[in-house]
Amino acid sequence: MKAPAFAYCKAATLEDALQFLDRYGDAARLLAGGQSLLPALNLRLTHPQWLIDIAGLEALRGERLQQHTLELGALTTHREIASSVLVKTHIPLLAMAVPYVAHAAIRNRGTIGGSLALADPAAEYPAVALACEASVCIQSMRGERKVKASDYFQGLYQTALESDEILCAVEFPIARRNERFGFQELARRHGDYAMAGLAARASISEEDKIEQLHLVFFALGDRPMLATNAIACLIGQRIDSQTIRAAQQALDDDLSPPDDLQAKAATKLHWAKVLLGRVLAALASNKGVRAND
Ligand SMILES: Cc1cc2nc3c(=O)[nH]c(=O)nc-3n(C[C@H](O)[C@H](O)[C@H](O)COP(=O)(O)OP(=O)(O)OC[C@H]3O[C@@H](n4cnc5c(N)ncnc54)[C@H](O)[C@@H]3O)c2cc1C
């Protein structure tokens, strides 16, 4: 199918793009890497009157390392994330997730800003952002604001972004020395959207006890889901077969995935438990990637 007719405007500056959005609001869509928007247009799932091309905006590019954070510009592509030494060093969980995002051609153009703005429940970055307690930096003609990932993802393809706002950057706290990370996903083919996935960040004491833990499942609900009951089971514990089993059981209260064409809810819950077992085993051994490894 062909896209419906739309008017196209290439923003020369961020101010330009913000003014356009201010004027056209809901009738406009931002075009970043185009890897989700263009298929959606061609399938006529969206009918904007205006496309505002932001791909050339320098203000939305680059990596900025501060004392406690690494900020990635919204237009940072999946490929740039995969090859970034700063990301590998300071946001190991993002580096672990990026090889699972789509296929090479899509990774060349798709952006972190596009992925977080779209908020596909099966996407990897929203889960990583929530597990890392990242914040998104947002601008409009009304001003700037920063929203925590825990407040940002609000439902199926729903975020805190208003129709006149641009997601300009994502700010990740840099990994601490005692943190370990785990990432697992199940997909039909490597690079396809996940059928179930888990991003994990843990602080583990010298006595091997879990001090802090973020377990975020994706593709199992309408947004990335923090498994609070499983986490409560594990805090203060050593990871062994008994604690793993208890945490897997607690997922019954954390997740209620819907039946869909891919699988029944019970099957998806089983996948989640298998992924949790694998991630916890990796965190317990030296296979869970450590900060600054
Ligand atoms: C075959 C295929 C497989 C894929 N597999 C995966 C996968 O496994 N995992 C995964 O995570 N993704 C996957 N994707 C999606 C891919 O990662 C996209 O690159 C990403 O979701 C959107 O990024 P983009 O830059 O292409 O955004 P675009 O397609 O340009 O935009 C997407 C949406 O976000 C809005 N938007 C874009 N940038 C901003 C911004 N800065 N501020 C506000 N709104 C903005 C747009 O208006 C649009 O509504 C796949 C895509 C395809 C086609």
Image (cartoon, grey):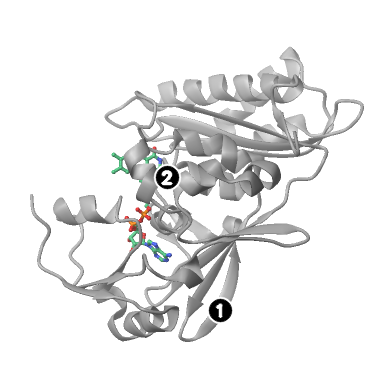
Looking at the image, which residue is at 48% across and 61% down? Answer: 74
Residue 126 place in picture, x, y as percent: 51, 48
Task: Point out the tag, 1 or 2, that comes first from the N-terminus.
Answer: 2
Looking at the image, which residue is at 43% across and 43% down? Answer: 123
Is residue 245 placed above or below 62 in the rendered structure? above
Residue 22 place in picture, x, y as percent: 36, 84
Residue 281 place in picture, x, y as percent: 68, 19
Left or right side of 274 for 156: left
**Element type at mark 1:** strand
Hey, what amino acid is under mark 1? Answer: Glu
Locate the C terminus and report the quarter of the image it occupies: top right
Left or right side of 193 for 286: right
Specify the quadrant of the image occupied by residue 196.
Answer: top left
Hey, what amino acid is under mark 2? Answer: Pro
The residue that disc 2 covers is: 121
Sort mark 1 into few (<14), some (14-19) or many (20+) by Cα contacts within 10 Å: few
Using the rendered image of the protein, determine whether residue 254 is visible from the camera's viewpoint: no
Residue 100 place in picture, x, y as percent: 46, 33
